[in-house]
Image (cartoon, rainbow, N blue to C red):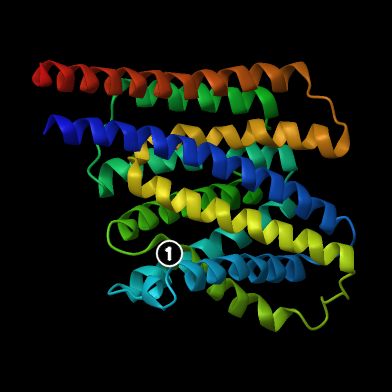
Amino acid sequence: MTVNLQKNKLNTLKGIALVLFSLFLYAYSDALIKVLLNKNYSVEQTTFLRAFTRLIPLFGAVALFYRSWAPLKTNRPWAHLSNAVIGCARTYAFMWAFKLIPLAEASALSYTSAIFFVILSVVFLNEKLQRYHIIAIVLGAIGVVIAYRPGLEIFRLGAIVTLVGAFFAAVNKIIIRKLSFQDNSLGIVIYPNLFLLLITLPFLGENWKPVEMEDWLVFLAIGAMAALAQYSFAIALRLTKGLTLAPYDYTYFCWIILMEYLFTDVTPTEFVLVGAVFIIAGNAVILMEEFKKAKEAKKKIEALAS
């Protein structure tokens, strides 16, 4: 039992590391997507090619490590379909929101996904909410509000659409965590990308622009990073409880600050930096608690061994 406790704590730390890594990759790939959108590639074409280039390394991994279709086998096709449909709805909700309200306000409201994730983890995953989970979530939320300073008119259509998208994002994570207990992580991330290809394909006709060679390289880089990010996140959700991972959603904001500075030379304001401190503090609360638990589990093992 003690050995299992130690293993669980180590898995938790691995899950946290994987989430941080995946959010860094998401931020980097999103920065590259913004570069491509500025070159007048349509949202439909960019979405299609992002899904297409994600599938290249994912199917490559299936061929290299399994040499069969085993990772795609499942006894829960409807759960995979639900995951794909909700993921697609989340994507289009955020796109619509960005057209309706200022980007800063939409971005700030989108981080409510972490709060929804906590609530859904308690209700559907039967996870126990601890005081440090609440502290971490609150610190992260305060940090985002300080940094973005969204408007007060939260009941406008754009704000409501953003909140709906954030809710869908949280539901996505719940479904992925449930699927990850039985299904292969590769299959979990492949199916939504196949669905996204089918959904965007009919809209490519008038929205297609010939892709330059250097841009193909960028699309391939985006696909590789996004595929690795999706896979890492799926593994993290298998290893670690949703309540522990939820506050780390806010670290995406910190990576975005870095990417914006590197790609556009935009210097973070004092509000952004103060907000980042709150977000990092919230993450540190979770991390310190997990290190503490891992250390206690190790001491128990050493005591039994002696």
Direction from residue 39 to residue 129 in the image, left or right: left
Circle 1 is placed at which residue position? Answer: 188
Q: Residue at x 68, y 38 (%)?
A: 105
Nearest the eye: 15 or 57: 57
253 shown above or below 282: below
Find residue 244 and report its image quarter. top left
| Residue 298 picture location, percent across and down | 23, 21
Q: From where the camera sits, is residue 227 visible?
A: yes
| Residue 196 picture location, percent across and down | 58, 72
Nearest the eye: 160 or 44: 44
Q: Residue at x 55, y 33 (%)?
A: 250
Q: From where the camera sits, is residue 152 visible?
A: no
Most distant residue in the front direction: 306
Q: Residue at x 34, y 44 (%)?
A: 239
| Residue 183 picture location, percent across and down | 33, 64
Direction from residue 304 to residue 171 in the image, left or right: right
Nearest the eye: 219 or 135: 219
Question: SS at mark 1?
Answer: helix
Q: Quadrant of the C terminus?
A: top left
Number of callouts: 1
Q: Amino acid at mark 1?
A: Ile
Q: Residues within 10 Å of mark 1 (few under 14, many from 20)?
A: many
Direction from residue 306 to residue 291 in the image, left or right: right
Nearest the eye: 38 or 25: 25
Find residue 146 and report its image quarter. top right
6 shown above or below 89: above
207 shown above or below 155: below
Q: Residue at x 82, y 76 (%)?
A: 207
| Residue 190 picture location, percent across and down | 50, 68
